[in-house]
Image (spheres, helix red, strand yellow):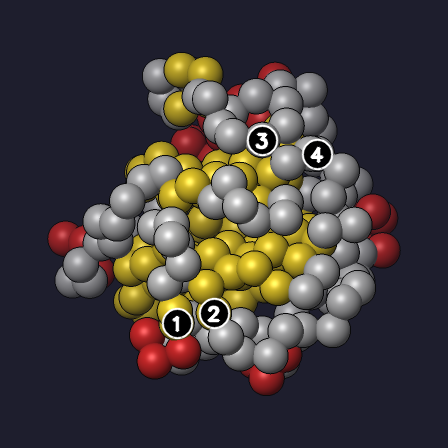
Amino acid sequence: MTARAHRLVGLLAGAGLVLASAAACADREPTTPSETSATSTSPAETTAPPTPTATTTEPDAPVPFPADLLPDEQEASTDAALTITDVTTGRHEGYDRVVFDLGGTGTPGWIVRYVDVATDDPADTVLDVAGDGTLAVILLGVQIPGTTGIPEWSGTNPVLTPDYPVLREVNVRGQFEGQELAYVGIDSADRPFRVFTLTDPTRVVVDVRHD
């Protein structure tokens, strides 16, 4: 783990959180569904709602799918060199979705958990994220465009979704030393979530259930 990873984990722990035990993580249901049950973010299947986000149209995944409130962590592959190329959201029957599109090589990892306070590393500035619950999303295996040769996403940030059932905001804070920090604002901190990857293109997906 890089020095910044230690720092980010320390910041989250300082907000009143601890890492889930290995046993708790082992009890978590597998969170990688097939691509046929997930939402596509390709331009051909995207329609634009009256917000800066993209609402997808592929059939929804079965609900309730396995999800909980525990921190979710996955290591990136050793050859990961990825850049965020798009950030989209979707409203579905029973859940809201956030998708981080990534271009480059390797497989991304992540650290996703609820936090009490959203802070802007390394300045430690407290951020005002919409909603009464906040998921911190740290994408692993991410590099600057100069390293990957992939143009970086430059869309409207934060992405505001006030009309969604539970999702309120996606706020991407920036990349440093192989990690990209973002905050996902939720209407409350008791919404179960899951995290998984999709390919062609590479994506990290965060689904938050309505129940």
Q: Residue at x 42, y 32 (%)?
A: 4
Position of 175 relative to 196 (above/below): above
Estimate the x, y position of residue 126 in percent, counting from the top left.
45, 16
- How far is disc 4 from disc 1 in space, using C-alphas? 29 Å
> As rendered, which of 9 and 185 lies closer to the eye?
185
Q: Residue at x 63, y 73 (%)?
A: 60
Amino acid type at mark 1: Thr
Secondary structure at numbered mark 2: strand
Estimate the x, y position of residue 83 in percent, counting from the top left.
29, 57
Q: Which mark is residue 131?
A: 3
The reply to whether discs 3 and 4 touch (Cβ–Cβ < 8 Å) is: no
Relative to residue 151, is residue 182 drawn left or right?
right
Estimate the x, y position of residue 86 in percent, counting from the top left.
32, 58
The reply to whether discs 2 and 1 touch (Cβ–Cβ < 8 Å) is: yes
Which tag, 1 or 3, sits closer to the chain's start?
1
Q: Which residue is mark 1?
A: 46
Amino acid type at mark 3: Gly
Which tag, 2 or 1, sits closer to the chain's start?
1
Q: Which residue is mark 4?
A: 189
Q: How packed is label 1: few (under 14 Cα within 10 Å), some, or many (20 or more)?
A: some
> As rendered, which of 160 and 192 lies closer to the eye?
160
Amino acid type at mark 2: Thr
Q: Which mark is residue 56?
A: 2
